[in-house]
Image (cartoon, rainbow, N blue to C red):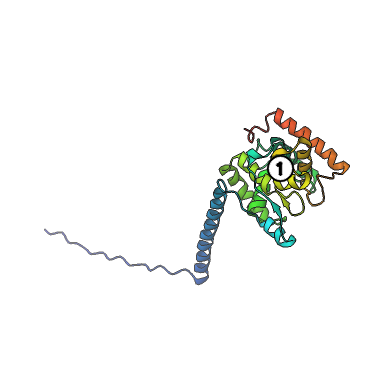
Amino acid sequence: MAKSTKKTTKKRTSRKPAPAPQRLWRRALRWGLRGAAGFAGVLVFWIMLYVVINPPTTPYMLAESWRLGGIEHEWVDLEDIDPVMARAAVAAEDANFCLHWGFDMAAIRQALEGGANRGASTITQQVVKNVFLWQGRSWPRKALEALMTPVVELFWTKRRILEVYLNVVEMGEGRFGVEAAARGYFRVGAGELSPTQAARIAAILPDPKDRNAANPTAFLRRRAAAILDGAATIRADGRATCFED
């Protein structure tokens, strides 16, 4: 006997299209994610580019040059900067520079306990702010700084971070980098600074517009002396090894 076969037909269920507002939100989200990924890619490429290329200028330098009609700035490699200048800058701004990955958690805790007037920005954070971002205390800038700081630490060596810092940091009205500071204040190159001169240049940070390394106040002299002691300390205890040959 032949088996009887029954043909079964399945009903096609048609999918209802998503409501127009929902489609718009999905599309906006998709394009937003693509835009964020593209922006992140540009930032990473920019950071990696400066591993081998010296930043020709910074947003703040451009702004100050426009405001003042020109600035003093001359790039000098780290090996041509007197080592005491590098140690003095680290002692003044970020004594644990060799020990952290971009954020000094101990300094952050102390800043929180000490109130808003106490800073905790590391040299790496200052490099990110000066080279890639803009000045000010806005939350968008701080968020970008927090995201970019570990990336800089990942791709740059500590020597490179310090080298860029010493060449872009503001060290007087319209004066950027240690070479311009050394020549402007003491008429010598960055490789010819004495320990006292280096400490006085470091002492004008973080208020370079209102302090003068060549004509120091009593406060600035005391600060320079403390920085000189700090520079000797970080050399002795090994906290300068990451940027010294």
Answer with left or right where residue 225 lies relative to residue 80.
right
Residue drawn at 44 percent across, 69 percent down:
17
Answer with left or right where residue 114 lies relative to residue 12.
right
Q: Nearer the viewer, residue 194 or 4?
A: 194
Q: How many marks?
A: 1
| Quadrant, the N terminus | bottom left
Residue count near mark 1 (Cα–Cα under 10 Å), binned few <14, some 14–19, many ≥20: some
Q: Residue 172: x, y in percent?
A: 77, 50
- Give the residue at the far right of this rendering: 218
- Kindly identify the amino acid type of the residue bearing the numbered disc 1: Gly
Q: Nearer the viewer, residue 36 or 125?
A: 125
Q: Secondary structure at mark 1?
A: loop
Answer with left or right where residue 93 lies relative to residue 216.
left
Above or below for 233 versus 165:
above
Residue drawn at 65 percent across, 39 percent down:
80
- Give the residue at the far front of this rendering: 187
Q: Residue 210: x, y in percent?
A: 82, 51
| Quadrant, the C terminus | top right
- Give the residue at the far bottom of this rendering: 20
Above or below for 145 versus 153:
below
Q: Quadrant of residue 114?
A: top right
Q: Residue 50: x, y in percent?
A: 57, 48
Q: Which residue is mark 1?
A: 189
Above or below for 238 versus 158:
above
Q: Nearer the viewer, residue 176 or 90?
A: 176
Q: Residue 40: x, y in percent?
A: 55, 54
- Give the residue at the far top of this rendering: 236
